[in-house]
Each structure stands twice: as structure tokens, then as C-alpha cells.
Image: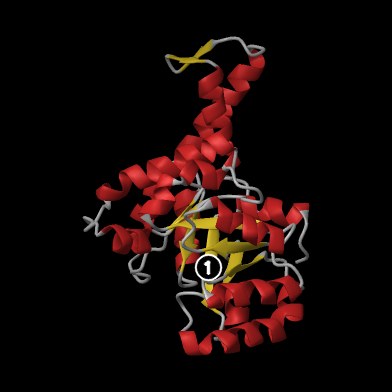
Amino acid sequence: MTTGPSTHAALARARTLLFVPGDRAERFDKALHSGADAVVLDLEDAVAAAAKAAAREAIGAAWPRLRSKAVPLVVRMNDARTDAGRTDLDWLARLAAPAAVIVPKADAVGTLSAVAERLPGIAIVPLIESAAGYAALPAIAAAHGVLRLAVGHIDFMADTGLQCSDDERELVPLRFAVAMATRLAGLAPAVDGVTAAFDNDERLRADTLRALHFGFGAKLCIHPRQIAVVHRALAPSEGELDWARRVVAADAAAGGAAVQLDGRMVDAPVVLQARRTLARTLVP
């Protein structure tokens, strides 16, 4: 898939972004056929330091074939302030453009500006995974080239020393702040972090519903089997769809004036909520 407005639009609507280690070329095709809305070729955490050069070579060798598929390709680079990150930027600048680059350890606008300048036209997804990133959220969200924000909660816990309960209630301020920064900057819905227990569907479903409740629209995934679970959890139920359709129909019949439905007042905010529910049925 070539890069351009349509690719960015598809990535903005993506519900699942599946990581695949950049040095595991034998997994590339499986990731592309997993049903994920976007595939993230990883050069950072999933790749050992000694294997990063080999990962770039493997991605580069497969790139023409991967790029011909109808799946947006994203690259997670290394921290742009490190030698590995600077090498990634040089390499990415020579690569036929991916749909986006995930910038890890995003905690300063200057870093994002350097990435945007080096990779013009490529969408940026900052990964918020530190206290400094949390503090800089409004500026990061407003930085040039940023398409949507992503939460790296495991690294965030490591950086801050937080010890989280199973429901991660300790991270409510982080997710709320990401949701508000997303709204204020007019970005595509945020992307929640991974569920490490990839064989626990109930945990994954609960994590996905929590993300949805915060207004997030997607989730980072680490295994193909997670894709279908996330998509089902993000989709509105038949009851929700029925309500949304009736709200929109009632609003249209009333010509935009306030109207009652099922004993409740339907006005502009309720109609907006209904339209957002219907929008969740759209796929990239």
C-alpha cells in the first residue's frame, strides 16, 4: 500500500496495530494476513541490540512485496535520541515511505520535530511511556505530523515505579490525559497499549472495553489471535446499533430540533454520541 491521504485515513481508522519483530521475516506474511488493520514492523523492544541491523535488512528486502499489500505498514523505530534511533531515521529516509512511524519514549516536541523534518509526509504516532511524556502531552499531541497518540503503559509503569492492580486503575489519569490531548488536538482516536497475556481472551476483552470507555479507538497487539477479540470488543452491540439508528432517524424527522425517544430527550449531544456509535461499524 502506497503512502498518501488514503493510507493515513486508513491508519486513522485502524482498530488493531499488530507488532511483528523486524528480524523475524518469516512472520511478516502471517502478520499481513492476520486481519489486523495495520502491521507494525518493530525495530525497538522486540529486537535485540545485536540484531537491529539485521532487522533493517530483513524489512528492506521484503519491503517491495509487503508494500504491495492492502495493509498499512508502520515502523516502530528506536528512541530517536540514541545511535540506533538516528540510524533508523537515516534508513527510513531511504525506504519507500511507510504509512507511519511509531516514535517510542516520546516526551519532547523537539524529538518529534526532528522525525517529521527527516521523514516529511509520514504520519507520526508518539508512544507515551514516561512521566515526561505525560507532562508534555498537550504539546506532543499538537506537534506537526502527529496522527494519533499511543499508550505504552508497561514502560510507563517501569519509568514511574507504579505498581498496577489487574484493572490498572492507577493508570486512569494517564489514559484520561491522552484522551483529552487527543480531543484538544483533533487527532484520530488514541491507541491503547498491549495486553501481554496474549492467550487470555477475557483479559484482552476487558482491556479493550476499558480503552473504548476512555474514547480510544484502537489497541496495540502482540499476537495474531488477539485481532478478532479486539475487533469484536470495539464493535457496537446490536442493542447499541438499534438505539443509534433510531436516534439518528428521530433527529432527522425532527429537523434537528430536540425530540423525545424512549422517554429521553434527544438533542445535539445525544445525536453526536449516536453517530459515533454508528461510526464504530466502519472498518479501514
Q: Nearer the viewer, residue 32 or 102?
A: 102
Residue 279 shown left or right of residue 134 in the figure: right
Question: Residue 127: image x %, image y %?
Answer: 49, 58
Q: Is residue 2 visible?
A: yes
Question: Residue 14: image x %, image y %?
Answer: 59, 55
Mark 1 element type: loop
Question: Residue 119: image x %, image y %?
Answer: 71, 63
Residue 107 shown left or right of residue 268 in the figure: left
Quarter of the figure with residue 142: top right
Q: How many marks?
A: 1
Quarter of the figure with residue 165: bottom left
The residue positioned 61% from the left and 77% from the top of the image is: 87
In the rendered image, which quarter contains the C terminus? bottom right
Q: Is residue 213 visible?
A: no
Label 1: few (<14), some (14–19) or many (≥20) C-alpha neighbours in 10 Å = few
The residue positioned 49% from the left and 57% from the top of the image is: 106
Task: From this view, report whether residue 279 is shown above or below residue 165.
Answer: above
Residue 53 shown left or right of residue 130 in the figure: right
Task: From this view, report whether residue 56 is shown above or below residue 44.
Answer: below
In the rendered image, which quarter contains the N terminus? bottom right
Question: Residue 54: image x %, image y %?
Answer: 59, 89
Residue under numbered circle 1? 81
The residue positioned 61% from the left and 64% from the top of the image is: 101
The residue positioned 47% from the left and 85% from the top of the image is: 49
Q: How is the image coloured?
A: secondary structure
Task: From this view, report whether residue 54 is shown above or below residue 191.
Answer: below
Task: From this view, report whether residue 12 is shown above or below residue 67.
Answer: above
Task: Tell me the amino acid under the disc marked 1.
Answer: Arg
